[in-house]
Image (cartoon, helix red, strand yellow):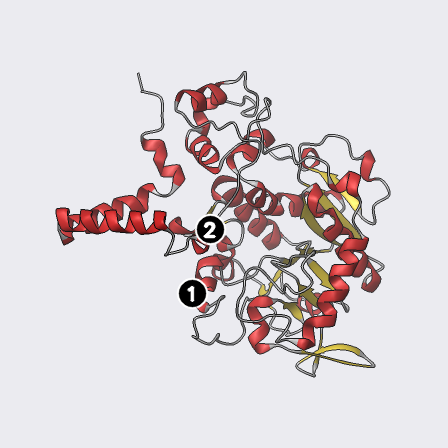
């Protein structure tokens, strides 16, 4: 038996339906599995979905509530990947297993992948198979150094002792240190895979241009259509396209993660994106897709912030196996005593790219830093910046956000 799988929280179910339908169209002899990452214990609501449903409680994860407090929704969805894959390989005695991110659509058979798995234990796809121009646009090659050499929106494995050894190694690191934390060299499950070709035998690197086409490699790939289907660079069949960073309800949006291309200047992509967005909208089911994630608030409804998650991760051993989301337990009391709690129901996320250098608040901070430089002198200022770089990693703030030791 062969299988394929993806992982979603309920809000991404339309993507999972679209992926499963497209994969099964080209691989009808495979089974397709979807792990639902949410605080759920009953799968019957999903019984007529076009895939086999697996809940987090099915896959032998240790301390699910603690893991869900330690990681945000992106981190949790990505870091349970090796555990899920191990479960499927063992439970269903699969010969091969393909993982695909939910925002992927399959357009042809994945025959190059299965051919590689005849001799390889694991197959990966690199983000890039040719250099990116240094033109100031994103993504650039430095982004790939930051995020990882291989895109883990795809990974394929076959049943073998070496695969089992790799998945055990990967799982341990994902469950322990799968943070999205660029300053410490971490990026969820993906960055660890940089090490895999050197640590394990039988690692295949698929450079087929039709596999894992996405915004990060559009500089080297374009689409054409003929009677045989969709071709990449007029030669390779498009196997699967990764619509990473897509905004479904924005007809003009290619990806929120790039400014190198737009749909307006890539007419070869226009119909592909329009069809995909229409399919996702058609696959929406308001009741199921609105099921609560369940790991983003405390039992009193107040929001869990990233700082709270990081401090919990740093002090996790101190809180035993209690439910950290329950306001009657020790972590909530700890967070309250240290002023970590907020009363908002939702936290707005932002990245450094959203900081406007002309914003008066940013200019004020920059001005204060200039004054500090002049007061301390270059050498001491550099030392201060090194410390700020260390302490800006939220987990490291546990050195002072802690209970006094006896």
Distance between the alpha carbons at the discs numbered 2 and 1: 17 Å
- Report crowding for label 1: few under 14, some 14 to 19, many 20 or more residues within 10 A (C-alpha): few
Residue 3 percent location from the top left of the image:
75, 54
Is residue 114 toward the left or the right of residue 333 in the image?
A: right
Does residue 386 lie above or below 304 as drawn? below
- Locate the N terminus and report the quarter of the image it occupies: bottom right
- Figure disc tally: 2
Residue 282 percent location from the top left of the image:
81, 54
Secondary-structure class at tag 1: helix
Residue 69 seen in render: yes
Residue at the image position 56 percent from the left and 27 percent from the top: 302
Q: Which residue is mark 1?
A: 142
Q: Which residue of the protein is positioned furthest toward the front in this rendering?
A: 360
Residue 174 percent location from the top left of the image:
53, 44
Residue 93 percent location from the top left of the image:
75, 48
The picture quadrant where one finds residue 123 is bottom right
> Which tag is nearer the camera, tag 2 or tag 1?
2
Counting residues from the start of the chain, the first of labels 2 and 1 encountered is: 1
- Locate the C terminus and report the quarter of the image it occupies: top left
Secondary-structure class at tag 2: loop
Residue 93 seen in render: no
Q: Which residue is mark 2?
A: 351
Query: In the drawing, what numbered circle is on residue 13?
Result: none
Is residue 371 toward the left or the right of residue 77 in the image?
A: left
């Amino acid at each position: 038996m062969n299988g394929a799988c993806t992982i979603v929280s309920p809000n991404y179910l339309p993507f999972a339906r679209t992926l499963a339908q497209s994969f099964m169209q080209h691989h009808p002899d495979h089974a397709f599995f979807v792990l639902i990452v949410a605080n759920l214990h009953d799968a019957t609501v999903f019984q007529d979905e076009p895939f086999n449903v697996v809940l987090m409680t099915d896959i032998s994860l240790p301390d699910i509530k603690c893991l869900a407090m330690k990681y945000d929704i992106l981190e949790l969805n990505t870091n349970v990947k090796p555990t899920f894959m191990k479960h499927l390989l063992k439970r269903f005695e699969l010969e091969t297993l393909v993982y695909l991110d939910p925002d992927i659509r399959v357009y042809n058979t994945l025959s190059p992948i299965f051919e590689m798995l005849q001799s390889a234990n694991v197959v990966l796809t690199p983000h890039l198979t040719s250099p990116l121009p240094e033109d100031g646009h994103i993504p650039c090659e430095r982004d790939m150094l930051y995020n990882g050499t291989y895109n883990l929106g795809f990974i394929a494995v076959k049943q073998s002792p070496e695969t089992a050894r790799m998945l055990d190694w990967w799982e341990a690191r994902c469950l322990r240190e799968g943070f999205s934390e660029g300053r410490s060299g971490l990026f969820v499950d993906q960055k660890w895979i940089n090490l895999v070709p050197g640590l394990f035998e039988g690692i295949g690197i698929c450079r087929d241009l039709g596999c894992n086409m996405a915004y990060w490699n559009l500089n080297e790939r374009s689409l054409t259509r003929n009677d045989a289907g969709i071709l990449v660079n007029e030669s390779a069949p498009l196997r699967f396209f990764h619509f990473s960073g897509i905004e479904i309800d924005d007809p003009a949006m290619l990806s929120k993660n790039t400014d190198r291309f737009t749909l307006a200047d890539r007419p070869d992509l226009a119909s592909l994106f329009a069809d995909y967005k229409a399919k996702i909208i058609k696959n929406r089911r308001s009741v199921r897709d609105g099921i609560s994630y369940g790991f983003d608030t405390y039992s009193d409804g107040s929001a869990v912030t990233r700082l709270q998650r990081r401090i919990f991760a740093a002090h996790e051993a101190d809180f035993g196996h209690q439910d950290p989301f329950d306001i009657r337990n020790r972590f909530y009391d700890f967070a309250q005593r240290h002023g970590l709690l907020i009363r908002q129901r939702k936290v707005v996320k932002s990245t450094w790219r959203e900081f406007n250098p002309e914003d008066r608040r940013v200019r004020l901070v920059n001005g204060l830093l200039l004054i500090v430089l002049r007061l301390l002198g270059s050498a001491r200022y550099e030392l201060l910046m090194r410390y700020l770089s260390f302490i800006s990693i939220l987990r490291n703030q546990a050195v002072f956000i802690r209970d006094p030791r006896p």
